[in-house]
Amino acid sequence: MPVSWIRSHKTSLWRRLDPVQAVRVIVDCYGEEAGAEVLLRAFLEERDRNPAAVRFWLRVYDLLNGAGEPQA
């Protein structure tokens, strides 16, 4: 089975960010479509059987939608 794009060399870049940083970057890149992009990435990680990455992207999605915002 071919490996999805999520396992490309760019994957390690996301693993260095925390979810709050990832929200900022993904919103800058995808704007209003950021939520769809995050869910797509979570789906692809699930397909690749990477539960830690799925949890990361779902946390990003929660933050993107205002759930569980960090305390200032």
Image (tube, rainbow, N blue to C red):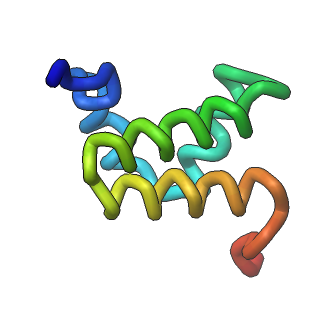
Please identify the quadrant where the N terminus is shown.
top left
Residue at screen point 79% across, 69% down? 67
Residue 58 relative to residue 12: left or right: right
Q: Quadrant of residue 22?
A: top right
Q: Is residue 70 above or below residue 55?
A: below
Comparing 65 with 13, the one in front is 65
Query: At which x and y percent is residue 17?
Result: 42, 49
Query: At which x and y percent is residue 60?
Result: 60, 54
For the view shown, which residue lies furthest in the bottom direction?
71
Residue 39 relative to residue 9: left or right: right
Please identify the quadrant where the C terminus is shown.
bottom right
For the view shown, which residue lies furthest in the left direction?
1
Residue at screen point 38% across, 49% down? 46
Q: How many marks?
A: 0
Residue at screen point 29% across, 24% down? 4
Query: At which x and y percent is residue 39?
Result: 61, 42
Q: Quadrant of residue 68?
A: bottom right
Residue 51 relative to residue 30: left or right: left
Comparing 11 with 2, the one in front is 2
Residue 5 relative to residue 66: left or right: left
Comparing 21 with 34, the one in front is 34
Query: At which x and y percent is residue 25?
Result: 60, 34
Residue at screen point 70% across, 74% down? 70
